[in-house]
């Protein structure tokens, strides 16, 4: 089992992804070959959530949050 396969088991869960110069927190939507997509809530109440694509090669670590 590689990182992509392990991460795919947590689709639909809240995660934190730590990159070299960025932090992403949200719901894991999908995992592909070399990337994953996270739905990130917008801090503004007037804007909807956004989807962020994270390239696995840029990830330092991922933390799965308890529900």
Image (cartoon, rainbow, N blue to C red):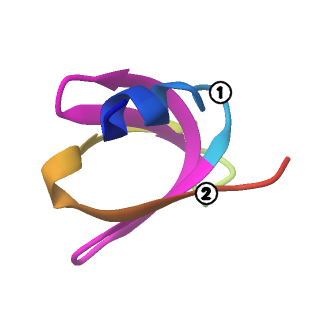
In the picture shown, does residue 33 fall above or below 47? Answer: above
Magenta segment: 15-41
Mark 2: which secondary structure? loop
Q: Position of residue 14 (x, y in %)?
A: 66, 45
Q: Left or right? Give the position of 3 relative to 57.
A: right
- Residue drawn at (14%, 52%), measured in percent from left and top? 57
Quick one: which residue is furthest to the right in this view?
67
Q: Left or right? Give the position of 44 relative to 6.
A: right
The residue mark sitting in front, 2 or 1, is 1
In the rendered structure, find residue 12 and report the number of the disc placed on it: 1
Q: Position of residue 39 (x, y in %)?
A: 52, 37
In the picture shown, does residue 44 fall above or below 8? Answer: below
Mark 1: which secondary structure? loop
Q: Left or right? Give the position of 49 relative to 37.
A: right
The answer to whether the residues at label 2 and label 1 have Cβ atoms under 8 Å apart is no
Q: Position of residue 34 (x, y in %)?
A: 17, 33
The residue labelled by disc 2 is 44
Q: Which quarter shows the N terminus? A: top left
Q: Residues within 10 Å of mark 1 (few under 14, many from 20)?
A: some
Q: Earlier in the sequence, mark 2 or mark 1?
A: 1
């Amino acid at each position: 089992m590689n990182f992509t396969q392990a991460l795919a088991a947590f689709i639909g869960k809240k995660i934190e992804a730590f990159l070299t110069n960025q932090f992403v927190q949200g719901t894991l939507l999908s995992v592909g070959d070399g990337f994953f997509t996270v739905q990130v809530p917008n801090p503004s109440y007037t804007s909807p959530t956004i989807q962020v694509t994270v390239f696995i090669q840029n990830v330092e670590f991922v933390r799965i949050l308890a529900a």
